[in-house]
Image: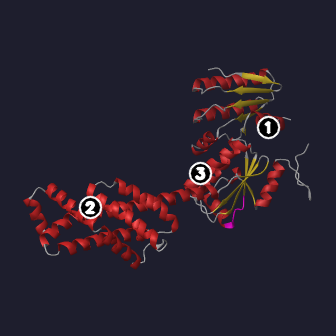
Amino acid sequence: MEVPVLKQGPYLIASIQSALNDADLVHFRDALVEKVGRLRSRGVIVDVTVLDVMDSFATRTLRDLAHMIRLRGAETVIVGIQPEVAFAMVQLGLSLAGVGTALDLEEGLSFLDQTTA
Amino acid sequence: MNESGAQLQGAAPAGETETVLLRELVSLLRRNRTQNREEWARRITQAQLLTAMSQEEVFAEATTVYDNYVEALETGTLEALDAYARDLSERIIPRGVETHEVIGIVLLLRDVLARSLFAKYQTDFALLNRILDAYEPAANRIANTVAVGFVQERERIIREQQEAIRELSTPVLQVRERLLILPIIGAIDPQRARQLTEQLLSAIRTNRAKVVVIGITGVAAIDNNVANHLVQTVEASRLLGATVIVTGLSPRIAQILVTIGVDLTKMNTVGDLQGGIEEAERLLAYKVVPGGTASAPA
């Protein structure tokens, strides 16, 4: 399952459309990290609104993705984590430490405007 | 079960004997309805039960209970009585009628009816024994049904009230746009902590909150679990893009948190609620103008 990545000015917007398996996640991570450099983006928004489960692999992959993108000179914000998902994640001890999070796409954009200004 | 009863049941088929006796019993109780009912109502007043109700009400309820009682004896089914007991409970619990009163009046009726049986059959001891053998198990079942119905109804009402109190006790308040306050008062148990987090997370989403101030001035003490839960709530809120500021940590709670080694780097704490709101406004870039109204910068 391919994740569409839209370019919006200096930002990339990756909107996950359905649940991804582990291989898809890794593919998504690699493609996005590659694209950030190629398009000289300053910020990336990953929208996970549709996900109603975030397991340890998904959490770790998203965290790695954010850290890799930071090493490539851009900032990442993960938006749209559902309340139940957030609660389940903290209960399972899954952490997105060091990764920016925001309520939705709009918030994510203003987060990037602030952090990459 | 006494000896003569066992012998008599041995002499005739047990089921048939009991049915015949119960039928006789029921017709007797129907004949003496007025007398027994009055005696019962008199005993209720004498024992000072149901003082929350007027004489007329007691008598009216007593009549219905009596008829239901006899009917239950006659048919051997308790559904109608059970339904009536629950209906009665629902009506009288809000008026302050206590469990002992309800059980008391049913046991009184049991006694009144037993007395009337003694009076009727005092000359034939063997028959009296058989009648009582038929009467007692049925009467006990009836008393049990009414008592259990009342207690269950009471418990249901208590559960509903607890639920209502729990929901009311932790309101999530919106102070201004994007700023929520969650004052916590009273003891926090794991169940309440969980409910609190769920309420907060959904409020963050519906109000698009950016900053949440949790005031725990009204919490006397917390244990390890609740402390960890607090940290989890802060973390979960962050995942939704909201910053949490915890205010009003008492010296005792501060001590507990330090002693159990909660990761305090994740927690944003301010001394009191006022400080917390000021900090939140700073984060939201609101300016508080003395004597004026707060406004967002252009």
Q: CA distance from mark 2 to mark 3?
A: 46 Å
Q: Quadrant of residue B18?
A: bottom left
Relative placement, left or right, of A28 versus A22 is right
Residue B89, horizontal then vertical, whole percent: 45, 62
- Discs 1/2, front: 2
Question: Which kind of residue does numbered mark 1 sit on?
Answer: Phe
| Residue that numbered label 1 is attached to | A111
SS assignment at label 2? helix
Residue found at the far left of this picture: B11
SS assignment at label 1? helix
**Circle count:** 3
Q: Can you say whether B240 is above or below A7 in the image?
A: below
Give the mark, 2 or 3, whose residue is nearer the N terminus: 2
Question: Which kind of residue does numbered mark 3 sit on?
Answer: Gln
Q: Is residue B248 magenta?
A: yes
Specify the subunit that label 1 lies on. Answer: A
Quadrant location, the C terminus of chain A:
top right
Q: Can you say whether A34 is above or below B153 in the image?
A: above
Residue B162, horizontal then vertical, whole percent: 55, 59
SS assignment at label 3? helix
Specify the subunit that label 3 lies on. Answer: B
Q: Which residues are magenta?
A: B247-251
Specify the subunit that label 2 lies on. Answer: B
Quadrant location, the N terminus of chain A:
top right
**Where residue B195 is drawn, which disc sits there?**
3
Magenta stretch, overall SS: loop
Residue A4, horizontal then vertical, whole percent: 70, 21
| Residue that numbered label 2 is attached to | B138
Q: Residues within 10 Å of mark 1 (few under 14, many from 20)?
A: many
